């Protein structure tokens, strides 16, 4: 542009070159606008939101401490909060819990709506104690520890 203003480049040559550069710039802008924007990383709930959700869960569970008072059977408690239990081929079991009160129907279940809050392993000793409470037993050589991942609805 400076050379054109100084008269070193004729008007025709300048305008041809300018038009060429303008069309190339328009093509590049169009190509950039057509490119997909990368999906933003999924935002995890903030500490404040998690604290509030955990407090709501605690309040809900406090209401079920005395099953006989509220007239709720233990099986109903599981039905109320457990959305889905998924055994994986790897041996891991995924528990999907919903403490919000609005249970999603089976057709609208989506793992992406849940986030993992804990994981643990059910060992032989724990399983044996549980079985012993019901008058049965389990042989140690029959047992394989079970990794469990716990997810709650966000």
Image (spheres, rainbow, N blue to C red):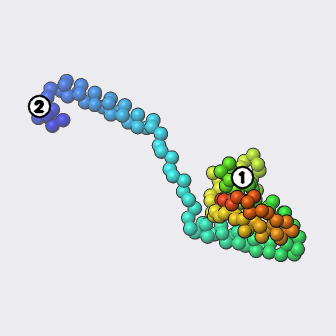
Residue 86: % across, % down:
72, 52
Distance of mark 2 from mark 1, alpha carbons? 77 Å
Q: Quadrant of the C terminus?
A: bottom right
From the viewer's side, name the closer residue of 51 and 12: 51
Residue 25: % across, % down:
33, 34
Q: Residue at x 71, y 52 (%)?
A: 87
Q: Residue at x 71, y 72 (%)?
A: 58
Can see residue 100? no
Residue 29: % across, % down:
38, 36
Q: Which residue is mark 1?
A: 86
- Name the N-terminal-most of marks 2 and 1: 2
Q: Which residue is mark 2?
A: 7
Q: Quadrant of the N terminus?
A: top left
Q: Indicate the quadrant where residue 78 lies.
A: bottom right
Secondary structure under the numbered disc 1 in the rendered image = strand
Q: Residue at x 63, y 69 (%)?
A: 52
Residue 90: % across, % down:
65, 51
Can see residue 32? yes
From the viewer's side, name the closer residue of 29 and 149: 149
């Amino acid at each position: 542009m400076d050379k054109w203003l100084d008269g070193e480049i004729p008007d025709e040559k300048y305008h041809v070159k300018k038009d060429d550069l303008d069309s190339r710039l328009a093509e590049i802008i169009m190509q950039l606008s057509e490119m997909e924007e990368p999906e933003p990383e999924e935002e995890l709930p903030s500490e404040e939101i998690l604290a509030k959700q955990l407090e709501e869960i605690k309040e809900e569970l406090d209401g079920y401490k005395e099953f006989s008072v509220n007239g709720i059977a233990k099986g109903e408690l599981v039905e109320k909060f457990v959305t889905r239990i998924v055994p994986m081929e790897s041996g891991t079991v995924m528990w999907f819990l919903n403490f919000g009160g609005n249970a999603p129907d089976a057709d609208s279940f989506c793992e992406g709506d849940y986030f993992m809050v804990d994981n643990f392993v059910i060992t032989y000793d724990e399983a044996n104690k549980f079985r012993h409470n019901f008058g049965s037993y389990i042989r140690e050589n029959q047992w394989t520890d079970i990794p469990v991942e716990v997810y709650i609805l966000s």
